[in-house]
Image (cartoon, rainbow, N blue to C red):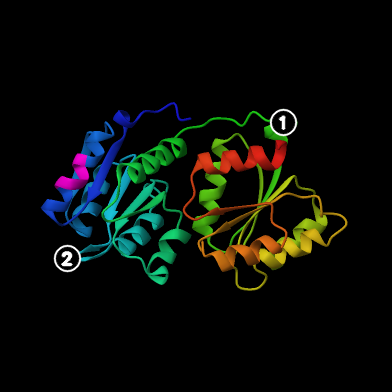
Amino acid sequence: MSDLSADELSILLIEPSPTQRKVIISFFERESVENIDIASSKADALAKLDFYQPDLIVSSLYFDDGTSLELLREIRKDERLQDIPFMLISSETRRAQLEEFKQSGVIAILPKPFTMDNLHTAINATLDLLSEEELNLPHYDVQSLRVLVVDDSPLALKMINRVLSNLGIVHMTNANDGSTAIPILEKETFDLVITDYNMPEVNGAELAEFIRHSPQHSHLPVLMVSSDAGETHLSHVAQSGVDAIVGKPFSTEEVKKLLYKLLDG
């Protein structure tokens, strides 16, 4: 669990509606988060971010001068801001509209309206991401673990690497597709593979099948990361031989529990 507390968080809330701002702030205050700055537009948010970097950005989807996706793209291009956790609050449910957020490493996507449980989970995920707590694995030296991370999204790769680093893992090799991961597997030895599902050439399920049918790698635990939580999709993925599946966005705590299960279960 994080060594930070909710009352230490500083938040930039970007919400054009005064009524919605009031509601959202009241929810955060019930979680003891009181250091909240307000922006009502993309331009206003960027101007505030020029002067300070909050611990967390919380944003609605639409503003008068653009969208939070446009804002997120600008933030991810700025070296000063690109590592700030980003939380979306939106009534949008269409997968295509939310997919880029999921692939960009957002900390959480909260429905509108959201519940206290939704917010509590998202705040804990933020606190965990901002903290470092080394895994205590009885059968492994965590600093010797070798992990292959496969994802075609550079931002998702960076997010996974950050979570693993916070858990004390230092030996990470990145690949941007299953097609590039396979040659790496043939040359190097790993203790764990973490792979995205949707990739353009060799997807995560196909990579898992390669691992399971390889005498050299069949023992390797495979953790699948997927933005698609549909039952049919998950059933197909499970048949490919993955050991565990986590959705996007994911939390440090979720990954930690799965790593305990996969490596010391």
Residue hosting label 1 = 141
Residue hosting label 2 = 64
Percent across and percent down for residue 246 are 56, 52
Percent across and percent down for residue 95 are 42, 68
**Lower sequence index among marks 1 and 2:** 2
Q: Establish if 163 lies above or below 47.
A: above
Q: Establish if 150 lies above or below 141.
A: below
Q: Give the magenta-colored segment's residue range.
A: 22-26
| Along the viewing direction, whichever of 76 and 141 lies nearer the viewer | 141
Q: Establish if 24 lies above or below 177.
A: above
The residue under the point 47% across, 61% down is 103
Q: Secondary structure at mark 1?
A: loop
Q: Secondary structure at mark 2?
A: loop
Asked whether residue 170 is in view, the answer is no
How many numbered marks are there?
Answer: 2
Asked whether residue 242 is in view, the answer is yes
The Cα–Cα distance between marks 1 and 2, rounded to whole angstroms, is 51 Å
Percent across and percent down for residue 28 are 25, 39
Label 2, residues with CA under 10 Å away: few <14, some 14-19, many ≥20 = few
Q: Is residue 23 magenta?
A: yes
Chief secondary structure of the magenta portion = helix
